Amino acid sequence: MRPAIYRRILAVAGVALLIAASGYAFWLNQPRPKPLEEVAAKAEPEVAALIRETSRLVEDTLALFPNDVYAWDLAGRMYSRFGKTEQARRCWEKCVELDDNFVPAHQALGVAALESGDLRRAAEHYQRAWRLSPESSVYPTQLAEALIQDGQLAAARDVLKKALRRHPRAVAMRALLGQALVQLREDAEAVEHLSLVIRMNPEYTNGYYPLATALDRLGRREEAVEMRRRFQELKRQDESRHREQLKDAETQVEAVRMSVAQAYVSAAKIYISMGDASTAENYLARAMELAPQFSEAALLTAWLKDRMGDRTSAREQLERLLESQPTHLETMMQAARLFAEWQDYPRAETLYRKAIELTPHEAGGYLALAGLYVTTGRRPFEAQVLTLKAAAREPTAAVFALLISAAQRNGDPITAAAAAKEALRLEPENPDYQQIAKALGVRP
């Protein structure tokens, strides 16, 4: 009897396993839920159509490039943009699984951890992003924000001071340092930094209130009252603008169209990297149709046309873009770089000079034109003068490194040595600056 019972039990178990396996196979063959389709179902018709278009783009890109970190990053950004934060987090975790040095994923996971309240985890991701991309001004600022929320004020202060040596004109970073210093009750230094913030950007609302607090504690009552008054005034203006934006349905639709255009540009870059220029060109055309003011799509189209052997069309594309956005600084700078790449140096020079005219108090235009002269070996004296002007506006190690090259080309070893000394002072651990300084006979 006992063997027969065992046989019946095994038979029942086998049937159960077959049923379970059949059910699992049926589940696997079912269409997977698409997160953005769920969002589209609850949206207004025009927005819903755009979200469904984004969903198709994201799902198609993932299906074709399942092992591409940029495809997963695209999915993560679009899921996050439309409120699917958990699915976005999984996408960025997949990015890190594929490439642990993929900076955008560490930044995005830092944001996700911060929003969930996991401050230590957020700080780890921001720290990793900054370590992998030390030239960034964004990652140390985000790291400091996480540290401040975690109560690590001194650590945040140290991070910001170090980063400001590389980015002295980073307003948000300096404002955050000022806020940390106020909390640390280092009021005199806080006033110094926050006063500089509102000089650089008088409309920077969040610089005024902590400045008022520090001034109050230093006994400078009248100045504190004025700073509080200005803070309240700017805050009311900010809130009014925000309310108007929320009421403007057209603005919201335009924001969605811009997001979809950005998704197409990201997908186009993936196809370019895979050698599929035709699909990339179609995606860029759709991006420009969705958001004509989105200059990145037009710039990338011009670059792609040139790579496909049609420089005439590429130039026409650039000129149309510059005509439509004659005072857009980033468009001007990127277009100038393309003209320089095509060895049309006079056109590049004209655009860089126009950038200087538009932003005479910023270093970018001076640096770009000086870099053009240094690279092409033209106008060595003017290259040095331009770099000195950039250094006066943005005294960073990178600017002094360019000044070394400009001064050497201009036959000015004294200025080159002085620039090397300053670059090494700002970044003493940089091996390139150490080597240059040694070659020029400069001691730390």
Image: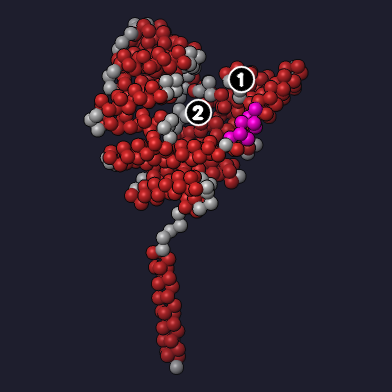
* Vertical placement of residue 352 versus 2, above or below: above
Q: Amino acid at mark 1?
A: Pro
Classify mark 1: helix, strand or loop.
Answer: loop
What residue span does the magenta drawing correspond to?
A: 237-245
**Which quadrant of the view contains residue 20?**
bottom left
Question: Residues under labels 2 and 1: Cα distance?
Answer: 21 Å
Q: Amino acid at mark 2?
A: Ser
Q: Find out whether residue 410 is within the magenta segment.
A: no
Classify mark 2: helix, strand or loop.
Answer: loop
> Percent position (x, y) of residue 109?
50, 43
* Vertical placement of residue 257 versus 384, above or below: below
Which residue lies at the image location 42% right of the left edge and 79% below the top edge? Answer: 15
Residue, disc 2 = 137
> Percent position (x, y) of residue 409?
33, 10
Which of these two is toward me, 84 or 140? 84
Residue, disc 1 = 202
Which residue lies at the image location 39% right of the left edge and 47% below the top edge? Answer: 57
Which residue lies at the image location 32% right of the left edge and 40% below the top edge? Answer: 282
Mark toward the start of the polypeptide (2 vs 1): 2
Left or right: residue 93 versus residue 381 is right
Q: Residue furthest bottom?
A: 1
> Percent position (x, y) of residue 54?
43, 46
Left or right: residue 330 versus residue 272 is right
Left or right: residue 421 versus residue 380 is right
> Percent position (x, y) of residue 209?
69, 26
